[in-house]
Amino acid sequence: MRYIITGATSFIGVPLCRYLADNGNEIFAIVRKNSKNLYRIKDDNNLRLLYSSMTEIESICEHIQTADVFINLAWDGSSQEKRNNREIHGRNVKDTLTAIRVAGKLGCRLFIESGSQAEYGQQYNLTDESSECNPYTEYGKAKLDIQRQGKALAESIGIGYVHLRIFSVYGEYDHDYTLICTALKKMLANEDVELSQCTQHWNFLYIKDAVRIIALLTEKLYDNGLSDNCIINIASPDTRILSEFVEEMKEITSSKSNLLFGGYKTDKLLSINPSTEKLKGYIGDFKFTPFNEGIYNTIEYLKEKL
């Protein structure tokens, strides 16, 4: 198939472009000329770079005649310091709606949007796709807004809209500010690790699993069509108390770090417990990477950086 992928230099974008291209698909990877991560992705026979920002996304129509699937991974302001910037996230919604119109103009059958666990807000029970959403960050509110507006717009122009609510992905090229990266770096240096109480439920999904799931889902949905409300949780079946994950990381690193649970104070102790039943219905007997294996791979990547 022929894919258009925005956010192609992102944490998920780079390996997704590479995976799809290596499996015989034609990829138009949309990148910004000034992206600091541009070095991660290269032109080859199946992967072509096109330079555009999301605010100028209509310009790609000058270079692409037709495509089958548009995957939008571009979203400014996902870092902690920008998550409550209403102006940034409002602009993201506007640009994404433009991208849906571009997808329709280019003949795409599917538009796939990267949503977020942040749309659900605080959840204390098993969270499936029908759970009530109560986002409390501007980031989460905007992601929920684009799910509602994007679905309506896509239906009006005759293309399928798929909203992937992606939970905590980790692995190579992860952001430095995430819990896993910051904790592993300190553990490798035998430094004390300040943490929240870590008494809440959490779920981690390895990056290579996330990529394979998105690719597999796209193929299934493209071939078989969509359900009426195509929202899908993208998560692993491994949900635990967060402290258990942290303690396992310490064991894997053979670290002498002290784990200071409760040393980091936070107003909201977010808890997540995603249902993956709907996902399983699409991908079947998928072999997930065990947490310890994903952490070993992440450690090797971090050691190369340090």
Image (cartoon, helix red, strand yellow):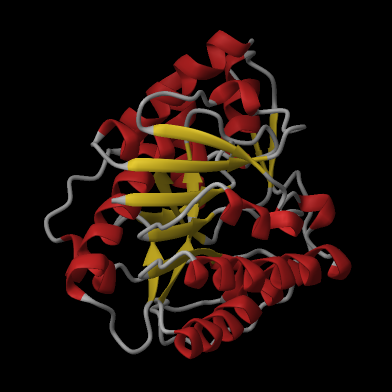
Residue 134 lies left or right of residue 206; in this view the side is right
Pick whichever, 298 or 65, lies toward us. Answer: 65
Query: Eyeballing the image, is 66 above or below 35?
Result: below
Residue at x 74% of width, y 53% of height: 76
Is the residue 45 above or below the residue 103 in the image? above
Up the image or down, 277 lies above or below 291; here it is below
Residue 298 appears in view: yes
Can residue 254 be seen? Answer: no
Q: Name the residue: 59% across, 46% down.
A: 7
User: Residue at coordinates 48% horizontally, 84% vertically from top-left?
Assistant: 157
For this rendering, which residue is in front, 5 or 250?
A: 5
Task: Give residue 97's quadrant in the image.
Answer: bottom right
Q: Pinpoint residue 55: horizontal percent, then vertical percent.
A: 76, 58
Residue 185's x, y, as percent? 62, 22
Q: Position of residue 300 (x, y in %)?
A: 45, 15
Query: Is residue 45 positioned above or below 237 on the image?
Result: above
Instruction: Write down the quadrant of residue 217 in the picture.
Output: bottom left
Percent of width and height locating residue 219: 23, 58
Camera-side residue: 290 or 77?
A: 77
Figure quadrant of the C terminus: top right
Residue at 77% over, 32% down: 34
Q: Quadrant of residue 237?
A: bottom left
